[in-house]
């Protein structure tokens, strides 16, 4: 990966590693060798250490001094707590936005659904999930609480991996698109109650079937 010198090197390495962990390019339990990461990015060990320490803070990697650095196994309890937090916040976000959203903002959200349809047809799961996240990030921003999205992001690594495993199931990404459409329809109608129900339907399923997901991928979980 080529480093953009206009942006913090440590931040770019952090984002790249985090993305690989979330999409399972780096599987739970796999070992990270900081020297190899530095060579990949063509940098010194210093920004790699900074990036891995940040990932450790988020619970996505485990660092054993003088021993090894590895991708953490998925912590179901932390995933459940993050889900509770995100659902509680997002309900209030869409209820507020249902009373203030503009036609221009609705067009932005519909554009993300178009992106998801493209990624669905191309079978690009990673890009689909990025568009999914951007849809929700924009919803927070439109409600003038974008900082809450960033706050939740620092805790949601385990939750994102559970949801990522859910999205690999047959027909699940089509369901996500339909659920996004339902959220938009409720917002367009200015109906806070319908918007809340749409968010509950959208965010609830991944953790409801956590036992099934864990049974299919037992080595990924604590």
Image (cartoon, rainbow, N blue to C red):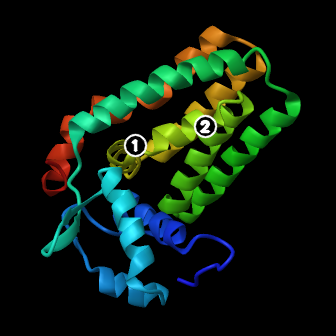
Q: Nearer the viewer, residue 208 or 14?
A: 14
Q: Residue at x 49, y 46 (%)?
A: 173
Numbered tag placed on residue 68 in the rendering: none
Q: Nearer the viewer, residue 172 or 127?
A: 127
Q: Residue at x 47, y 85 (%)?
A: 41
Question: Where does residue 118 sit, x and y in percent of width and height?
Answer: 65, 58
Q: Taking 189 as reference, is 43 left or right? A: left
Is the residue 193 above or below the residue 202 in the image?
above
Question: Where does residue 212 sit, x and y in percent of width and height?
Answer: 20, 39
Q: Secondary structure at mark 1?
A: loop
Using the rendered image of the protein, determine whether residue 178 is visible from the camera's viewpoint. Answer: no
For label 1, the residue is 156
Q: Taking 96 as reference, is 13 left or right? A: left
Mark 1 residue crowding within 10 angstroms, few (<14) / some (14–19) / many (20+): many
Using the rendered image of the protein, determine whether residue 49 is visible from the camera's viewpoint. Answer: yes
Q: Secondary structure at mark 2?
A: helix
Is the residue 219 above or below the residue 1 in the image?
above
Mark 2 residue crowding within 10 angstroms, few (<14) / some (14–19) / many (20+): few
Question: Where does residue 65 sit, x and y in percent of width and height?
Answer: 17, 69
Badge 1 or badge 2: first in the primary sequence: 2
Q: Residue at x 29, y 51 (%)?
A: 59
Question: Where does residue 55 sit, x and y in percent of width and height?
Answer: 36, 58
Specify the quadrant of the image occupied by residue 53.
bottom left
Numbered tag placed on residue 147 in the rendering: 2
């Amino acid at each position: 990966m080529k480093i953009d010198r206009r942006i913090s090197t440590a931040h770019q390495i952090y984002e790249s590693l985090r993305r690989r962990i979330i999409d399972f390019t780096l599987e739970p339990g796999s070992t990270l060798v900081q020297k190899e990461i530095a060579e990949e990015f063509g940098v010194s060990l210093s920004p790699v250490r900074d990036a891995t320490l940040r990932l450790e803070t988020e619970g996505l990697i485990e660092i054993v001094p003088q021993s090894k650095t590895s991708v953490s196994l998925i912590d179901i309890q932390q995933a459940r707590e993050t889900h509770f937090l995100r659902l509680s916040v997002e309900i209030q976000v869409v209820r507020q936005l249902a009373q203030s959203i503009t036609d221009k903002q609705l067009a932005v959200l519909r554009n993300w659904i178009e992106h998801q349809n493209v990624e669905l047809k191309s079978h690009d799961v990673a890009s689909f999930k990025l568009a999914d996240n951007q849809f929700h990030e924009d919803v927070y921003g439109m409600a003038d609480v974008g900082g809450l999205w960033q706050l939740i992001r620092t805790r949601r690594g385990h939750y994102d991996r559970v949801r990522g495993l859910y999205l690999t199931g047959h027909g699940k990404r089509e369901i996500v698109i339909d659920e996004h459409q339902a959220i938009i329809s409720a917002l367009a109608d200015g109906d806070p109650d319908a918007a809340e129900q749409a968010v509950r339907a959208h965010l609830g399923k991944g953790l409801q079937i956590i036992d099934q997901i864990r049974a299919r991928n037992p080595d990924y979980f604590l």
